[in-house]
Image (spheres, rainbow, N blue to C red):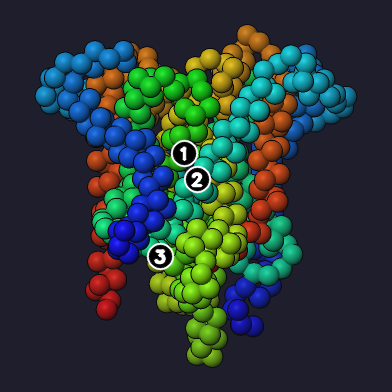
Amino acid sequence: MNRARRDALVGYAFVGPFLLVYAAVLVVPLLMGIVISFNNADLFGRREWIGLANYAQALSDPVLRQAFFNTLTLTLLIVPPLTVIALLLALALNRNTRLAAVLRGVFFSSLVLSVTIVTLIWRFILTPDAGLVAVGLQAVGQPPIPFLSDPAYVIPALAVTTLWWSLGFPIMLFLAGLQQVPGDIYEAAALDGAGRWTVFRRITLPSIRRTLLLVVMLQTAAQLQIFGQAQLLTGGGPGGASRTIVLYIFEVSFGRWELGYATAIAELLFGMILLVTLLQYWFVTRQEGDRA
Amino acid sequence: MSETAPSSQRLSPLVTVLLLIGAGIMLMPMLWTLLLSFKSNAALMADSGSAFMPPWTLENYAAIFQGSLTTRWLINSLIVSTGSTIGVLVLSSLAGYGFARLDFPFRRTLFVIVLLGLAVPEQAVILPRHQLFAMLGLHNSYPGLILPSLTGAFGVFFMTQYFRAIPPELDEAALLDGASRLTLFWKVLLPLTWPAQATLGVFTFLGSWNDYWWPLISATTSDYFTLTVGLASAQMNYAQTSGLGFLMAQAVFASIPILVVYIAFQKQIVRAMAGTAVR
């Protein structure tokens, strides 16, 4: 056996195991999904080719439209505040004191909890019959607020729960980004007598541009797929007021067994996430191009 | 980092107070959960505000060990998360070394195909994957719960970057000494990747431990529930069954293993994030 062939075999031996699993459990389902979305398919294997009919149905489905707007509202209520709060906390906690270390631990802590635990905790903060907020309101003689069953409160309730849960990871990313800003830039700025705000706007912010982009991209993609919080805390109610796109996909596939239609919605969501991510990336890198 | 970098400045009193308030908001929900878990269900039925006052009790924790399914779900979660972690570490290390160091046809193309996987959200594959696994009879089994987490492109990307950062002279020296590729990988390079293994391992374990969507649709008999799915079902049935105190004890009990992992590896995670993950 010649050397090149031997090297190739060794190479495939190393990357092969992963590629096999990757092909079978990711690539194959990805392609299957595209095919299924053109079919009138149920959960039990019935298939009938119907072309674009599922996609046409999706575009005129009022329930999906409501779920789309709920998801969009949640994403807008979560991503900007989350990014700003996480950045501020990272700036404050980026120092070598004991207090900062302890507080970092506190702000990271909720990220290790599962969605089930987070919703359990927040259910008994928000629920009007036994929740912590209701107990507090009762103590000052106020009636409880039905956060989880009043259409005006469900979306903000889900947003607050998600904010509390999601804070840790963006702080970690920002801290990592801040650590990579060279210290001598700050020295030079201090010598020039630059104020804090100037330093932040002219030095810190441009230096962590990439991290900022990463945080916004990851969080947007995550919140467009928000599911567990809505399913467990509100069940999408009342009257669909907190139904999200993925919750609707779950209901259509495992409640109504309309696998073809559910898959078509999932493909649309996939396209939407891809588009939004690319737009965000393009927006930031284009500005970098302008500077150069 | 130098003396004038912001990391060595002291916090102003106002910022400190704001931070402490923020920390209070972060911790309050957890403390509330902890308090509720130490109260009898009957006392909480009457008034959940009584959680702030004694008597507290351990009966809810005792109930977890007496014939509830919670311990079974804990074992399932441990098996699935450990299996996923070992699987990801082995597959990503092998593939990462292969992509970083070895030459074979279509290497670049294959690597790009793997990277494209980073852009595929779970929603795009989860329903057809459910169909596929149904055909293969993989639902309600450990392999069925573990396999999807082994497709993570991030691990391969992460390990490839890490192997690329190791000086290639090391390989050449070892190969000149007559070591085989496998010995070189196993004895020389792998020990150097320990920090990366720890980071990737912790994040994989965490992700798998907290995964909800896939086990929700794949594990449909309560014997194969993981903790997330089990506690979700308990939460849904809360009104009819176990009571608030018991539910909260379950939540605390379910969080303990992951908190231990997190505390044990906290330094490692943060340090490694600063180094590699954000490029």
* Neighbours of disc 3 within 10 Å: few (<14), some (14-19), many (20+): some
Q: Residue furthest bottom?
A: A191
| Residue at image coords 45%, 34% | B147
Q: Amino acid at mark 2?
A: Val
Q: Residue furthest right?
A: B55
Q: Amino acid at mark 3?
A: Arg
Q: What is the secondary structure assignment of the residue under circle 3?
A: helix
Disc nearer the start of the sequence (2/3): 2
Disc nearer the start of the sequence (1/2): 2
Taking B85 as reference, is B70 left or right?
A: right
* Neighbours of disc 1 within 10 Å: few (<14), some (14-19), many (20+): many
**Residue A66 visible in the displayed image:** no
Q: Is residue A27 above or below residue A134?
A: below
- Disc 1 versus disc 3: nearer the observer: 3
Q: Which residue is mark 2?
A: B88
CB-based contact (under 8 Å), mark 2 and mark 3: no
Q: Which residue is mark 1?
A: B149
**Residue B81 visible in the displayed image:** yes
Q: Which residue is mark 3?
A: B101
Taking A2 as reference, is A179 left or right?
A: right
